[in-house]
Image (tube, rainbow, N blue to C red):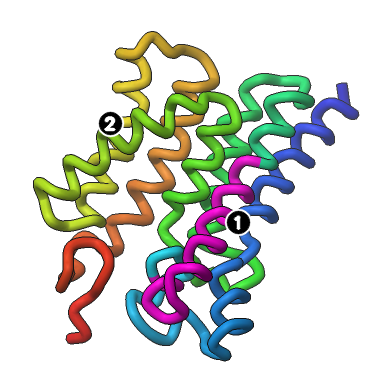
Amino acid sequence: MIAEIILSLGFCLLGYLFGSLPFALWVTRLVRGVDVRNAGSGHISTTNTIRQAGWLPGIVVLILDMSKGFIPTYLAFEYATYSWIVPIVGALAVAGHCWPLFAQFRGGMGLATAAGCTIAIFPFGLAIGLLILLPLVLLLKHAARASLIASLLLAPVFYLFGERGIIIGLAATMGVVLVFRFTVDWNREYKELWLDRDPS
């Protein structure tokens, strides 16, 4: 029993530590010699990497950010003793991306990492998430508000698609983290939809 609890806590710690790997910070420093947090949106994110280092580094960061959600969630799904650990691991991976231990707790917004977590146990969930998010972005013309609403809707929509158990749990726990994170940018002004920010 004690060993199982320690293993479960280990998966939770792994989720947060993986999420805390600030790939956008490292890649922009390597490619451009700049701190991604000092310009653009100020977030350690794919879109801010694209702004400062270009599309190729941005795509690399996107893949890496998705992997840091995928790997701990998949490992927990396959090897954790208790299935309820999986949603917690996923949420902690997203939280690690948003408030990374290895970057003074100044991170990104968590969408790519959440996508990786989802793919780990429900690949079709990524398509559902995009079908929720993209129309909202086009309708609201405000990525943060669209993302917040999409995060709230993810678990109920998964439920409507017939999903239950840990998939709903994962969507719900990640949704809580994402909603909290995106409230920061609720009043942010966008110059060009989601990719650019008004410098004022």
Which quarter shows the N terminus? top right
Magenta part, dominant SS: helix
Decide which of 72, 16 is in the foreground and name it: 72
Which range is magenta? 48-70
User: Which residue shows up at 54% across the image and 70% down it?
Assistant: 24
- Label 2 neighbour load within 10 Å: few <14, some 14-19, many 20+: some
Q: Is residue 78 above or below residue 42?
A: above
Disc 2 secondary structure class: helix
Amino acid found under the numbered disc labelled 1: Leu
Disc 1 secondary structure class: helix
Which residue, given by chain and number where applicable, does mark 2 sit on? 153
Disc 1/disc 2 C-alpha distance (Å): 26 Å
Q: Residue furthest bottom?
A: 33
Query: Which one is closest to the eye, mark 1 or mark 2?
Result: 1
Q: Point out which mark residue 64 bears.
A: 1
Amino acid found under the numbered disc labelled 2: Leu
Q: Can you give x and y, in whole percent of width and height, for residue 78 in the image?
A: 74, 24
Pointer 1 or 2: first along the chain? 1
State the count of labels: 2
Q: Can you give x and y, in whole percent of width and height, for residue 4 in the image?
A: 84, 26
Horizontal side of residue 27 vs 151, given as left or right: right
Q: Tell whether position 54 is magenta.
A: yes
User: Which residue shows up at 17% across the image and 86% down it?
Assistant: 200
Decide which of 63, 187 is in the foreground and name it: 63
